[in-house]
Image: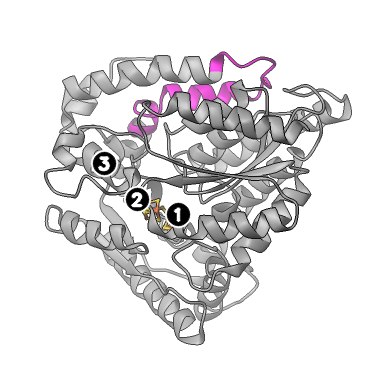
């Protein structure tokens, strides 16, 4: 980190010793996972820098924005529209939940047998080591899976910054109406918090910013179809993870610059893995920073990940919003159209997710699919079986993996993943 941020962290109420311990783990883990990769694109230097300052300079930026009167809105789900937050001059950031921290504190308020993502959030919150949560003015939860629904009730009793969005579980007319009315209520809540009015001009401008970010990520995704792949899956995932934290305009510029470099690599036939290395599509639960365990195992075994059918990946970022309407009602309708297309496993039926997995498998020339389920995540673990069955039936090799944030199962995962890659090589 470029300077001593301890006074800033102290002013946010972080537990400095615990936070030091977290950073002491993260730095070497990042170096070992990312910096040790061969032949990384030059453009990854920016993203390495962002990660080195993710609890430093970025938090300083958030605090500077707050000093200017802007509000920081922390979220946990891709159903929360960044367009609405930007349109009232807010800053949207993701919450810390990608590692197990202070599990004993988390398990004092939620069950041990809970998805690691939600338990991770409580560990970071109660252990006072998430500067994004500490810097936020509103924390937006959503009624998606049962774990999260109850998590927001519990956290809502601890914090007066909690706002909850009710989400439909079907894509019916009533489901669409519910999402629309929740977005309208959320917009009102944002107006109250920021003191800014939501206008057509502001929403069109904000939508253009988010559309450009999604276009850049889609361009990056398409480039990964090349064989050899011009960028590793670990780096592809990292960029999608950083999309939740970085300033959206700066982030887009940097992703586009990286894509220019990757286009040149593709034209020169240059890549990060040997031509013909097994190509894997990862599908399933979101992987938040610093959840890199399974992708690291896959790529260290000589394969390359060519896409993520995940909310930290294409499921969360695909599709832009039609910003052509000239009324707020029309623009909110367009938002609902786009967000209702996210095929999270909390929806029933959810056949479009299978279509998207197949579409990504073909588009990115994958040899097989690794279905990634977090332990105790009912929606994705329940979909895993039918997804595996349907893919295998049409000749797409599929491996189901269920894991948590711990390292105890690394050896077993390596064995299973290597056997799966052998199958892809045959
Ligand atoms: S739109 S995937 S970001 S809910 S892993 S907490 S589902 S038990 S994260 Fe998600 Fe929004 Fe859906 Fe995407 Fe529950 Fe499963 Fe845990 Fe999960």
- Given residues 114 and 134, the one toward you in this image is 114
| Mark nearer the N terminus (1 vs 3) | 3
Q: Quadrant of the C terminus?
A: top right
Residue at 23 percent across and 24 percent down: it is 19
| Mark nearer the N terminus (3 vs 2) | 3
User: Are the residues flagged by discs 3 and 2 in contact, CB closer than 8 Å?
Assistant: no
Judged from the image, the secondary structure of the residue bearing numbered disc 1 is: helix
User: Are the residues flagged by discs 1 and 2 in contact, CB closer than 8 Å?
Assistant: yes
Q: Which mark is residue 135?
A: 3
> Crowding near pointer 1: few (<14 within 10 Å), some, many (20+)?
many
Q: Is mark 2 within 8 Å of ligand 1?
A: yes
Residue 74 placement, left or right of 288: left
| Mark nearer the N terminus (1 vs 2) | 2
Picture colour scheme: one colour
Q: Quadrant of the N terminus?
A: top left
Q: Which residues are magenta?
A: 35-59
**Residue 208 shows up from this direction:** no
> Crowding near pointer 3: few (<14 within 10 Å), some, many (20+)?
many
Against 174, residue 117 (above or below) is above
Judged from the image, the secondary structure of the residue bearing numbered disc 3 is: helix
Q: In the image, residue 278 lies at what x, y percent?
A: 73, 32
Residue at 23 percent across and 56 percent down: it is 151
Judged from the image, the secondary structure of the residue bearing numbered disc 2 is: loop
Q: Is mark 3 within 8 Å of ligand 1?
A: no
Gap between marks 1 and 2, in whole Å?
A: 8 Å
- Given residues 30 and 372, the one toward you in this image is 372
Q: Which residue is mark 2?
A: 376
Q: Which mark is residue 167?
A: none
Which quadrant of the figure has residue 302?
top right
Q: In the image, residue 404 lies at what x, y percent?
A: 37, 38
Q: Which residue is mark 1?
A: 381
Please check the rendered image and state whether residue 36 is part of the magenta-colored stretch, yes or no. yes
């Amino acid at each position: 980190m470029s300077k001593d941020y301890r006074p800033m962290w102290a002013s946010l109420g972080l537990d400095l010793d615990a936070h030091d311990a977290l950073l002491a783990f993260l730095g070497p883990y990042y170096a070992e996972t990312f910096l040790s990769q061969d032949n990384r694109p030059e453009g990854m230097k920016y993203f390495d820098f962002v990660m080195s300052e993710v609890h430093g300079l970025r938090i300083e930026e958030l605090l500077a924005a707050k000093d200017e009167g802007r509000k920081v809105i922390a979220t946990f789900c891709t159903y929360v529209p960044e367009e609405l937050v930007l349109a009232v001059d807010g800053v949207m950031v993701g919450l810390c939940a990608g590692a197990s921290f202070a599990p004993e504190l988390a398990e004092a308020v939620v069950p041990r047998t809970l998805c690691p993502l939600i338990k991770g959030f409580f560990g970071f919150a109660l252990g006072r080591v998430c500067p994004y949560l500490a810097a936020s003015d509103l924390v937006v939860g959503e009624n998606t899976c049962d774990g999260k629904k109850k998590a927001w009730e519990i956290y809502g009793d601890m914090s007066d910054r909690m706002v909850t969005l009710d989400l439909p579980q079907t894509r019916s007319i009533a489901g669409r109406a519910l999402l629309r009315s929740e977005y309208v209520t959320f917009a009102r809540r944002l107006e109250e918090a920021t003191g800014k009015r939501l206008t057509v001009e502001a929403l069109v401008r904000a939508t253009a910013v988010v559309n450009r970010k999604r276009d850049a990520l889609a361009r990056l995704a398409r480039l990964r179809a090349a064989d050899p792949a011009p960028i590793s899956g670990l780096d592809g995932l990292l960029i999608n993870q950083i999309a939740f934290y970085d300033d959206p305009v700066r982030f887009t510029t940097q992703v586009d610059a990286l894509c220019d470099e990757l286009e040149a690599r593709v034209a020169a036939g240059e890549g990060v893995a040997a031509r013909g290395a097994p190509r894997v599509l990862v599908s399933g639960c979101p992987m938040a920073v610093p959840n890199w365990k399974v992708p690291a195992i896959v790529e260290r075994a000589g394969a390359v990940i060519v896409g993520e059918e995940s909310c930290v990946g294409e499921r969360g970022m695909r599709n832009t919003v039609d910003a052509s309407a000239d009324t707020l009602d029309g623009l909110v309708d367009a938002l609902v159209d786009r967000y209702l297309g996210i095929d999270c496993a909390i929806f029933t039926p959810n056949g479009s997710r299978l279509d998207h997995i197949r579409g990504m498998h073909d588009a990115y020339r994958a040899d097989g699919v690794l279905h990634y389920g977090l332990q105790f995540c009912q929606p994705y673990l329940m979909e895993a079986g039918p997804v595996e069955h349907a893919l295998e039936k049409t000749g797409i090799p599929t491996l189901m993996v269920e894991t948590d944030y711990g390292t105890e199962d690394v050896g077993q995962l390596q064995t299973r993943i290597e056997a799966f890659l052998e199958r892809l090589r045959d």
